[in-house]
Image: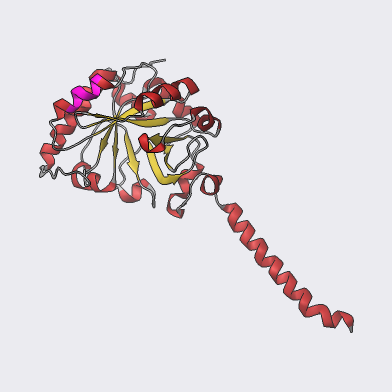
Amino acid sequence: MALSVFRPFILFSKALLLIGLVVLIAACARSPHSMKGDNSPHDGVRRAWSLPIHGIDVARYQGRIDFHAARRAGTQFVFMKATEGGDYIDPMFYENWNAARNAGVPRGAYHFMTWCRPAHEQAAWFAQMVPNDPDALPPVLDLEWNNHSRCKPTLSRDEALGKIAIMLQAMERHTGKLPIIYTDINFHRDILEGVHLDNAFWLRSTAAEPHERYNNRPWTFWQWTQTGTVPGIDVEVDRNAFYGSPRDWQTFLLTGCDPRALNRLRPQGRCITYK
């Protein structure tokens, strides 16, 4: 008699336990990157969480960074804003440049291209302000439409590609390394889609894998979230992943080139071993 009285309660308790277990398993199934490294994880970029080499990109908005803490937490590279247009340098650039090096985090500088300033002036500004450090990662040319600028360019595709070519050539002359191209979906669609370039690509795609947004453009780096969290940084930060294995990453560090392109680029005198 007593058992029959308590049976509904026992069954209800088991049901609650089962529901709780299902919720717990679902939570644990998410990658540690989604739980500990991103304030707003998106399931569309789940594959990024499993890639072994991760890094960040930073500018003045991240404030003072403890790169030692970031490195201990697994940050294996950092790209940092250096210059923009022909007269702006990020006020945190030199501090970030030296602090990352002192912490042993491989670092590279990026230039934000503006479209109402002649490309040769921007190239000269980058060369003047960014050190040519042999141990640095290749420089990055950041290609986006300057939607928040007072400048509203009316460039043709050929004109934009001409400016890009001037910048890429100048950055390669200055550093001796093949520049990386960073871009977003809109600029790639309008200007870069279908254009062959020897440069490695760093693609922004925060809600889907890059091949779904960039018409299968091969990529070396993937910016997969803008709401990342990293020890040593007090605010949200962009997080990025390298496409390949730790061995591929070591090859990239030694040559400055995507390992998949070495056979094609080395005969051109590029991708020499720097370290």
Q: Is residue 188 above or below residue 55?
A: below
The magenta span reads 122-128
Foreground pick, 142 / 181: 142
* Residue at image coords 44%, 30%: 77
| Drawn side of residue 259 relative to residue 8, left or right | left
Q: Position of residue 148 (x, y in %)?
A: 22, 46
- Seen from the viewer's position, the closer of residues 264 and 49 is 49
Q: Nearer the viewer, residue 21 or 111?
A: 111
Report the predominant secondary structure element of the magenta stretch: helix
The answer to if 133 sits in the magenta stretch is no
For the N terminus, the quadrant is bottom right
Q: Is residue 216 above or below residue 261?
A: below
Which residue does the image show at 38% across and 16% down from the upper left? 274
Q: Is residue 249 visible?
A: yes
Q: Position of residue 87 (x, y in %)?
A: 20, 28
Seen from this angle, which residue lies furthest bottom? 1
Q: How many marks?
A: 0
Q: Quadrant of residue 133?
A: top left
Quadrant in which the C terminus appears: top left
Q: Residue at x 77, y 77 (%)?
A: 9
Q: Position of residue 18 (x, y in %)?
A: 69, 66
Quadrant housing residue 122:
top left
